[in-house]
Amino acid sequence: MEVAASSISRFSDVDEYGFKRSDNFDYRNYEQFMSGYLKTLTKRRMKWEAILQRNADLATIDSKLKRYIRKGIPGPFRADVWMKISGAAKLQQRSPTLYRNLLTAHYEKEICDSIIIDLPRTFPDNIHFDTKKERLFNILAAYAHHNRDVGYCQGLNYIAGLLLIVTDDEEKSFWLLKHIVENIVPQYHTKNMANLLRDLAVFKEMIIRRAPQVNRHIENLGLPYAVIASKWFICIFAEVLPVETVLRIWDCVFAEGYKIVFRVALALFLTHKTAILGCDDIAALANLFREKMMQDDIVTNCHSFTEAMFKIRLKRSELEALRTVCVGRNNT
């Protein structure tokens, strides 16, 4: 009789954030990775405690702090550190009653209905999330009526939902969502999605420069970059990559900004180059990007994947130059 992998693993079939692991989850490789990573997390927590004692407000992100952030912010400190390094805490201090006032504002039925439709679709594989859906509605409705240019856009539910899981705080989640939508990826979630389309074109140009063979193969098979990567950019990889990997990415996003989004997208392509070139048809390629690539050992090992991200040569000047060239493009 075959024994389920989870029954012989010391790890549950539900992760520490409440997400059910998939039926084909590789417990053996995960256990091997975590045996070393848990020790690393313990040491890292002690170092962060010392950092926060010396520099409680984290006002300046110097090279040492940036290095520590890239290595991962310990879970118990994550919410407060995100608020400080992003600048969201200062914005909240300037408008301390904003969120509470938005909760008592008059809401438009059309916006509320759109949010309500998406609530059951948000993290249905999370065993705790049913108890958070009312709070998620509050965050999304408040933000939609605060920023009328964006309103509510699908994808924001995943960002706000994961923020709520991490912070367990509506107001912090609102301010971090506001920072992401308005400062990290502005005009990704507006009706015309102008900057999203531009940045997908930028990403394609970056693949052409770094992996022309991969780009030719994708174009020959006929899978558009918009199909491959739109959700990556819209959700900042939430509901795309394993949760711990997403949180490590978001640590860096809040500290370093939009450049990290491109680093992750590039790393996904470059670390899976052989697998992409091995796909013989569009269905196999779509399945690789949608399923196989997003749960394999490469992305599950958040530590080595983060290291791979930062080995990629990428300058802000290159990104900005490509953005200028790609404005208005919609051929990805």
Image (cartoon, rainbow, N blue to C red):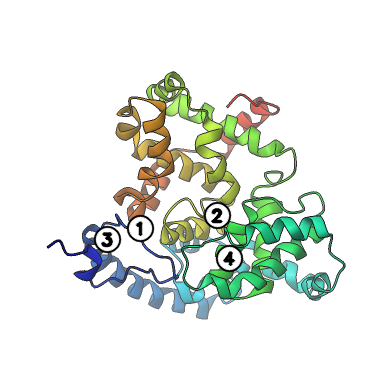
- Comes first in the chain, label 2 or label 3: 3
Which residue, given by chain and number where applicable, does mark 3 sit on? Answer: 30
Residue 219 higher or lower than 18, as above or below = above
The type of residue carrying mark 3 is Tyr
User: Mark 2, mark 1: which one is toward the viewer?
Assistant: 1
- Comes first in the chain, label 4 or label 3: 3
CB contact under 8 Å: marks 2 and 4: no
User: Mark 2, mark 3: which one is toward the viewer?
Assistant: 3
The type of residue carrying mark 4 is Leu
Q: Please state the horizontal and vertical placement of residue 278, each as a whole percent of the image.
A: 30, 29
Q: Which quadrant would the N terminus be assigned to in this image?
A: bottom left
**Spatial separation of the CA atoms under disc 2 and disc 4:** 13 Å
Would you identify the image quadrant in which residue 34 lies? bottom left
Badge 4 local density, few (<14 within 10 Å), some, or many (20+)? many
CB contact under 8 Å: marks 4 and 3: no
Q: Which quadrant would the C terminus be assigned to in this image?
A: top right
Q: Image check: 302 left or right of 257?
A: left
Residue at the spot 35% in from the left edge and 58% down from the top edge? 22
Badge 3 local density, few (<14 within 10 Å), some, or many (20+)? some
**Spatial separation of the CA atoms under disc 4 and disc 1:** 22 Å
Which residue, given by chain and number where applicable, does mark 4 sit on? Answer: 163
CB contact under 8 Å: marks 4 and 1: no
CB contact under 8 Å: marks 3 and 1: no
Badge 1 local density, few (<14 within 10 Å), some, or many (20+)? few
* Residue nearer the viewer, 20 or 194: 20
Q: Please state the horizontal and vertical placement of residue 270, each as a whole percent of the image.
A: 38, 36
Which residue, given by chain and number where applicable, does mark 2 sit on? Answer: 253
User: Mark 3: which secondary structure?
Assistant: helix
**Spatial separation of the CA atoms under disc 2 and disc 1:** 27 Å
- Comes first in the chain, label 3 or label 1: 1
